[in-house]
Image: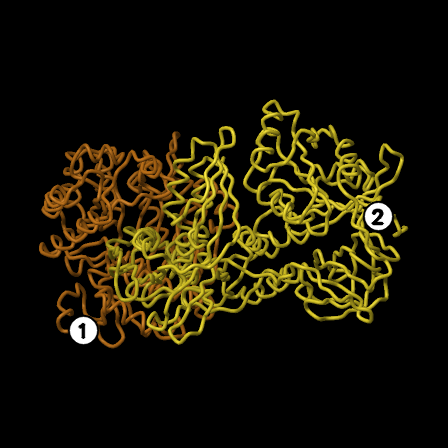
Amino acid sequence: MPADTPLSRIRNFSIVAHIDHGKSTLADRLIQNTGGLDTREMKEQVLDSMDIERERGITIKAQTVRLHYTAKDGETYVLNLIDTPGHVDFAYEVSRSLSACEGALLVVDAAQGVEAQTLANVYLALDNDLEIVPVLNKIDLPAAEPDKVKEQIEEVIGLDASEAVMISAKSGLGIEDVLEAIVHRLPAPKEGDRTAPLKAMLVDSWYDAYLGVIVLVRIIDGELKKGQTIRMMGTDAKYPVDRVGVFTPKMVQVDALGPGELGFITASIKEVADTRVGDTITEDKRQTTEMLPGFKPAQPVVFCGLFPVDAADFDDLRAAMGKLRLNDASFSFEMESSAALGFGFRCGFLGLLHLEIIQERLSREFDLDLIATAPSVVYKMRMTDGSEIELHNPADMPDVVRIDHIQEPWIKATILTPDDYLGNILTLCQERRGIQIDLSYVGKRALVAYELPLNEVVFDFYDRLKSISKGYASFDYQMTDYREGDLVKLSVLVNAEPVDALSMLVHRTQADRRGRAMCEKLKELIPHHLFKIPIQAAIGGKVIARETISALRKDVTAKCYGGDATRKRKLLEKQKEGKKRMRQFGKVEIPQEAFIAALKMDG
Amino acid sequence: MSPHKTAGILPFAKVPAAPGFGVYIHWPFCAAKCPYCDFNSHVRRSPVDQPRYVAAFERELKEAARRSAGETVTSIFFGGGTPSLMAPETVGALMDAVAANWTIAPEAEVTLEANPSSVEASRFRGYRAAGVNRVSLGVQALNDPDLRRLGRLHDVKTALEAIRLAREIFPRLSFDLIYARPNQTVETWEAELNQAIDLAADHLSLYQLTIEMGTPFFDLHKAGKLIVPDGELSAELYETTQQITAARGLPAYEISNHAVPGAESRHNLSYWRYGYYAGVGPGAHGRLKGENGQRHAIANEPLPETWLKMVESWDSGALTDEALSLEEQADELLLMGLRLTEGIDLARWRKLAGRDIDRASENDLASHGMIERLGPDRIRATPAGMMVLDAVVADLA
């Protein structure tokens, strides 16, 4: 396959959309219409290759497809579609993927209109100076209000939507118009210099069981050829290139990739962790002098402990995490041991969705039963001796007398909601220590911007938001900065023994509420014992909430008769089995189910 | 722990007797099914062919005797179902079958469970003639509304008459009451219990109502239409029961069984002391000695007609017959034995379990007043421990 398509006939673009607005379906149609795959090969949503992506309709890893399209002007164009992860947890990856494009299709559901996530992603696209073509999808739905939605796009985003392409990705309506718009309304890649030293961007990478690490690259200058030795400028590692190719979306090898082109390479790279999204790739013996801007290593922002329910699964869990990390350098883990939960791992994630996805993949793909501790954020502790400590796990909190002050991460949250629910949402944000920075209306929907401490959001913000808005509010956020906060460590004591897995850092104003809720919940969850069990929530030595589980009063089989000892024995064996699933705290046995439920607790 | 303090309340001789060897015969038919009962009982519209069942029992008894050769039968127990639906001739034939297969100890206890209805009482003399020397009457309550609610076919008047007649005819008598019934208060139960003790001979079985899965009461309870005393009230009812029976000379010797010291049910003791016993009839359970000191747990097919065909085909209605592991035997010894106020012999348990009782668990339980030592190798549940015995056993096992 020729790699020397003139730049004027190359378009690199991506699709920006809110979940469920039809991004993947549109991508499928584009592939189908340009003959990338025949109908037989066409699986629904080709790009979302992981089961979990297909099921949840989200894209986790960027993918790319090269389409050959013969336009109405008679010319054949190479259209490189970079499918980006839509979720804010992966904002950095999205931003890097977008920077490999010149344009983007903004897909908006003609019935639902602009959502919070649409905004976040479109801003990322605008930040990367992309040309944006609005596309209204699902215009054949009875509830579609294309004119209103166009107005919204103009009002909220400030984009001219008068020439929005009207389509129905599902029925195939308007797909040709989309292809024409890509050709005529999106710019060709900027002229690069094919003879200059190689300068390429590492857009994404993933692990393939057969080929090893596959690296998705966008060439800026120079040529990338098989046999070259490349150097990753950020990680300062060099590799000989084994394969060079493009996705049609099948992998097809080519001789070389030139400026403006997108493709893949394999280069006997062992781990995805050796490749960093946004890194600059150059030729080792003829290096470019300047790195591409915007490179940053992945930075986990949310942490939680993951423990096997059955301690015997620890090694399997370690192996499974290792496998996931092969493909996801932003997921980090290190061994942790908890008195409550035994041996497990402290894991770092890009955000809550990332956490949820990893957890789900571990249980689904590796069949592991896990307990996850409450998510926590990374706190910065400024110590009295002037040093700074990053705290990933509330259980590791240093002695308070050594702490000068604690800083916590803040986010800027954008919420779009039908105005019926606005009042409750504002209350929720206030309760969570939010600072309102914007409130405006788009038709009947309110657009609210709040600054919020991330620690209030990781707790149960999503669930509460969903429930108070009956699922209609959409939410997105970006990390902003660290701010000093009056944070305290809330410890939970069961029968006077601290339970490390349940301790958390909370704002002093929230401590009472959270402490009470935890005690009440545990009272429901811990079975009666032969003795009274006090449950306390405490800050330092001060108890702020207390409940008591009364002693078991009556638990005996009245009739054990007729010589049937077997039935009783089977019950006893079950009890003994059940005890193995209990965690021992001093003299109290807490079922793991209780931990799981306590950690899931709301408000 | 002070042995001299506790020794006085031991209802039996200080060194408990050997468990003995019992024969249990299950008669699986009832005139009506009680809504709380999950025992193996069946209601048949057409008359039961008793001679055919006798023939089957004879074959199964013979097979059980083959497996327990040399044992001397110290107790026979006709349980059910409703054994008092058997003709006295049937009981006589079954007694003969036991005697034909084993030696019966001269002082053997022969118990028959009976409903206190007038029809059944009319057969009491026949049972006595057949060799029954102890009856256990299913009185269950001493007020008519509760008897109706429990689905019983008799009323209080008939029950009192049956008790009177039984006391006249049989050397020994026990009767059952169910308490912790819906709407029961400590006061009403105290009165009823005192009345029962007035009527009692030397033994009473006092069971707290248990909502068993698969019974109509279970469904009613689940649907919220049957409210039974909660944990606190049922604990109070239990404590009251212990106090009153002890004060009036019928102390508990097992969780739910009370007797004048020396009048304990020897047959049931053989279960709780974890002895050997043969169980014949539909749904019966047995524990028989196997090769090399093994202990076999035998459970019979519960459906009478199927059991009948099995026995007629191969002399046994056993559905399962498994050699218990030592650990399983240790569990059974513990969970049965701790039901008794005499407790268990730890040396015997140790031999089965292959280890000592867990010292830390024991100390914990002792510190909460749940168990106590009666001498160096005997442990028992305290009255407080008895109330939560299932949890205590789980901690010790």
- Between disc 1 and disc 2, the foreground one is 2
Q: Colour of chain A?
A: yellow
Q: Quadrant of the N terminus of chain B?
A: bottom left
Left or right of B270 on screen, residue A274? right
Disc ID at residue B1: 1
Q: Colour of chain B?
A: orange
Name the residue at 78% across, 52% down: A262
Q: As shown in the figure, which amino acid type bears the numbered disc 1?
A: Met
Closest to the observer: B299 or B334? B334
Q: Secondary structure at mark 1?
A: loop
Name the residue at 16% across, 39% down: B142
The residue that label 2 is drawn on is: A7
Residue B70 visible in the snapshot: no
Q: Secondary structure at mark 2?
A: helix
Q: Is residue A417 above or below residue B101?
A: above
Q: Quadrant of the C terminus of chain B?
A: bottom left
* Chain containing mark 2: A
